Amino acid sequence: MGVRIGVIGATGLVGQEMLRLIAERDFPADEVRAFASPRSEGRVLTSGAREITCEVLRDGCFDGLDLVIVDVDDPIALEWAPVAAAAGARVVDNSAAFRSEADVPLVVAEVNPDDLDELPRNIASCPNCTTMVLLTALAPLHRAAGIDRMVVSTYQAVSGAGQAGIDELDEQWVARASDLPPLRRAAAIEGTITPGRVWGAPIAGNAIPLAGSVREAGYTSEEWKLVRETHKILHDDTIRVTATCVRVPVYVGHSMTANVAFRSAMDATSAATLLASAPGVRLVDGGAGAPTALEGAGIDPVLVGRLRDDPTQANTIDLWVTGDNLRKGAALNAIQMAEILVRRG
């Protein structure tokens, strides 16, 4: 007998990807229900051959559901995820609402699936998409040699800000710069494209070194997520992490460079051997390749390349990781967590 599953935020970019993955992966669902805002009530979505009519959140809407996956803004998740859990459903939350809660496990399916064995509040969280892509690649290396310190720079796609981010890049890049000669585009963008609704500077033809809102010590919310979520997922608060998160004019695919120092012996050759068989990872050209965000878009694994020894320090490597922020970075991991919960009863 299959399970009955609900998706909150089903009309969003990630929510629609979840519905596609439920069908693609033959998730054992007898029933799939979709929840969205009142403006989407009655809209018909698809999950493979299945047609699903959007519902609004209301009292009793989760009755009879076994699993509920949440992908909405934090305040809505804070309100409705506990309601779903109280109704008897296991909840997989893709917002940031519960990630820092000690009694809510934070899970990357290939890294710490056993954390799903204990759900005191019937809720489990998915990490931020940047953390997800990076730790899928780094966890096998950490298990082998223990990460001591890592310095990370990210190059994050506009879809990380949802449909509004994609629309803003479209409006700026296509409508105002595409018909200009290449040498004039940069000047035109700087002079004529005003900041949009999502970012305080034009994103078209630009790189904005301020992803998220500025928090303590001048680091942004995105950067602190990478630090704190790494500690929680790897169960090691002693790992030293520093990061700079940058928004770039890429539609789909978060990429990052990482300089990683280990406590025990580790070099690029050993890392390549470990990553070649790591779940959820595709090592490109034995680690010597240079995979792009476009190559990682639309596929399940994260891609790893530019793997090399740091010549300035022992037991330290550099690598490049890229992955689809909507797929592995969000929707796929949530579905994988749901699959684990089903397998474990």
Image (cartoon, rainbow, N blue to C red):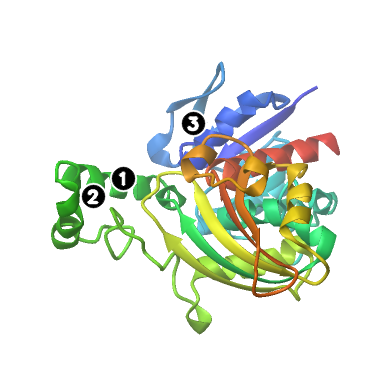
Q: Which residue is mark 2?
A: 172
Q: Residue 107: horizontal and vertical position, in percent?
A: 72, 53
Can you tell which mark lies on residue 167?
A: 1
Is 111 left, or right, of 202 in this rendering? Answer: right
Q: Secondary structure at mark 2?
A: helix
Neighbour tally class for label 2: few under 14, some 14-19, many 20 plus, Cα within 10 Å = many
Q: Callout 3, which amino acid?
A: Cys
Which of the two labelled residues, at mark 3 and mark 2, occupies the earlier sequence position?
Answer: 3
In the current view of this chain or complex, which residue is farthest to the bottom?
A: 217
- Of tags 1 and 2, which is closer to the observer? 2
Q: Callout 2, which amino acid? A: Gln
Tag 3: Cα neighbours inside 10 Å, few (<14), some, or many (≥20)?
Answer: many
- Mark 1 surroundings: few (<14), some (14-19) or many (≥20) residues within 10 A: some
Secondary structure of residue under mark 3: strand
- Quadrant location of the C terminus in the rendered image: top right
The answer to which of marks 1 and 2 sits earlier in the sequence is: 1
Residue at point 82%, 59% (across, down): 143
Percent coordinates x, y for residue 106 in the rendering? 71, 57
Instruction: Judge depth for marks 3 and 1 and give the one in front.
Output: 1
Q: Quadrant of residue 104?
A: bottom right
Residue 178 sits above or below residue 26 on the image = below
Q: Residue furthest top?
A: 49
Q: Mark 1: which amino acid?
A: Asp
State which quadrant residue 251 falls in: top left
| Distance (Cα) linking label 1 and label 2 | 9 Å
Q: Residue at x 46, y 55 (%)?
A: 156
Q: Please state, as top left, top right, bottom left or bottom right, where the N terminus lies in the image.
A: top right
Whether residue 190 is situated above or below residue 38 in the rendered picture: below
Query: Pointer 3: what residue?
Result: 54
Tell which of 71 and 224 is nearer to you: 224
Q: Position of residue 42 (x, y in %)?
A: 43, 28
Residues under labels 3 and 2: Cα distance? 32 Å
